[in-house]
Amino acid sequence: MGALTFDNNETGFLDWMAANPAGFVANRDRRGTSKYYPMAHRASCKALHTRDNYTTNDYYKVCAYTVADLAQWAATDSHRKLRHCELCRPE
Ligand SMILES: [Zn+2]
């Protein structure tokens, strides 16, 4: 199915999250310079909800039905290894 990018699209992201509670989300740093990103989470992870904004400012989100899809996206998009959240441990 591949990965869906939500950039400056809060409504689209929140709609996807509501419709896909068992999905996976990668948090992507916009500048692409941090070794801690992109970071994969389960859609249910609390760490995704610590801010009021999701897809604006310094970060945006990429969603998929499997972690493998996110890993493939990360390799293609940024040539960086996908990190995995320690809290929700997406597998
Ligand atoms: Zn998480």
Image (cartoon, helix red, strand yellow):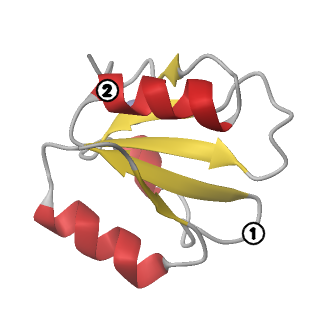
Q: Quadrant of residue 86?
A: top left
- Residue 75's tag is none
Helix, strand or loop under label 1: loop
- Which residue carries the number 2 mark? 67
Determine crowd level at label 2: few under 14, some 14-19, many 20+ residues with C-alpha closer than 10 A: many
Helix, strand or loop under label 2: helix
- Which residue carries the number 1 mark? 57
Q: Quadrant of the C terminus?
A: top left
For badge 2, the amino acid type reads Val
Residue lying at 54% horizontally and 72% vertically, measured from the top left = 52
Residue lying at 25% horizontally and 75% vertically, measured from the top left = 15
Measure the C-alpha gap from mark 2 to mark 1.
Answer: 25 Å
Residue lying at 64% horizontally and 38% vertically, measured from the top left = 77
Residue 77 appears in the rendering:
yes
Residue lying at 80% horizontally and 40% vertically, measured from the top left = 32
For badge 1, the amino acid type reads Asn
Determine crowd level at label 1: few under 14, some 14-19, many 20+ residues with C-alpha closer than 10 A: few
Disc 2 vs disc 1: which is toward the camera?
2
Q: Quadrant of the N terminus?
A: top left
